[in-house]
């Protein structure tokens, strides 16, 4: 059984068993076996320009006894995480997302975000179905598409146009090895994965936008 636990400055998504995890996370990127996906909350002061962030994070993971976990970094308040579960046919998808848009970007453009607390969007998606490496890649494309759709629909306008994400977004997809080769939008896998990520990111983006309006 998968579960999410908050222990500041950590958010821990226990997948329930070791799975193959595909990501470009700062710690253990690529396609790797892992039981847990973690978030580490940071502030700009935690990561001065001279710091070797990879080495620092590796030490942090070792101290937590979690060196084998896939790990995100974010300055978003990790207490503001959102979960979404979607069942489509025989496929169960669970997404966990933290959503900050302080360093939002429009695709194909770059804004000067120096000095900004980079809240970023980090999404972990767990699928309860067996996938080939090819299907894992396709699910990743679905997850990124869902994240982008959710961000665009909250209507955050930047000088170059409507925001499509942030400059430091990261997505991790977890599933057991299996035989499924197709996971596009016409499949149960694609529908469940896309809706779970869309729902989790939409909740987080709306909450972030409401915070900015209230502040």
Image (cartoon, grey):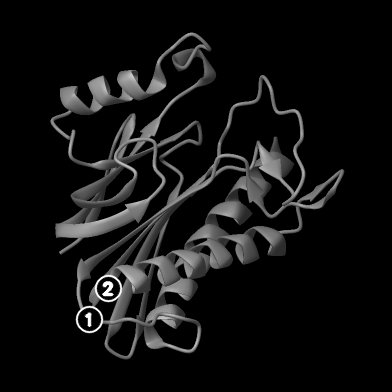
Callout 1 secondary element = loop
Percent across and percent down for residue 187 are 42, 88
Q: Identify which residue is drawn at 17% across, 25% down.
A: 62
Percent across and percent down for residue 150 are 61, 63
134 left or right of 19?
right
Circle 1: is it few (<14), some (14-19), or many (20+) Cα within 10 Å? Answer: few
Q: Identify which residue is drawn at 75% across, 49% down.
A: 108
Q: Which residue is mark 1?
A: 179
Q: Are marks 1 and 2 in contact (CB under 8 Å)?
A: yes
Q: Which residue is mark 2?
A: 132
On the question of residue 199 being in view, the answer is: no
Q: Identify which residue is drawn at 53% across, 61% down.
A: 144
The quadrant of the rendering that contains the C terminus is top right
**Is residue 150 depicted above or below 121 in this figure?**
below
Residue 54, by quadrant, is top left
The quadrant of the rendering that contains the N terminus is bottom left
**Is residue 101 depicted above or below 188 in this figure?**
above
105 left or right of 50?
right
């Amino acid at each position: 059984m998968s579960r999410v636990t908050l222990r500041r400055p950590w958010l821990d998504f226990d997948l329930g068993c070791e799975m193959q995890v595909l990501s470009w996370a700062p710690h253990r990127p690529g396609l790797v076996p892992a039981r847990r996906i973690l978030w580490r909350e940071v502030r700009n002061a935690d990561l001065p320009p001279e710091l070797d962030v990879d080495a620092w994070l590796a030490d942090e993971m070792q101290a937590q006894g979690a060196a084998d976990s896939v790990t995100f970094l974010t300055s978003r308040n990790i207490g503001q995480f959102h979960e979404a579960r979607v069942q489509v046919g025989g496929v169960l998808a669970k997404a966990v997302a933290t959503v900050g848009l302080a360093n939002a970007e429009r695709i194909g453009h770059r804004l000067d975000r120096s000095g900004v607390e980079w809240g970023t969007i980090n999404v972990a998606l767990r699928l309860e179905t067996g996938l080939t490496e090819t299907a894992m890649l396709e699910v990743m494309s679905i997850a990124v598409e869902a994240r982008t759709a959710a961000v665009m629909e909250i209507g955050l306008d930047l000088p170059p146009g409507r925001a499509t994400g942030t400059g430091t977004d990261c997505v991790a997809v977890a599933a057991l090895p299996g035989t499924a080769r197709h996971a596009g939008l016409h499949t149960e896998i694609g529908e469940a994965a896309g809706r779970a990520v869309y729902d989790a990111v939409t909740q987080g983006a709306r909450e972030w936008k409401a915070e900015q309006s209230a502040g």
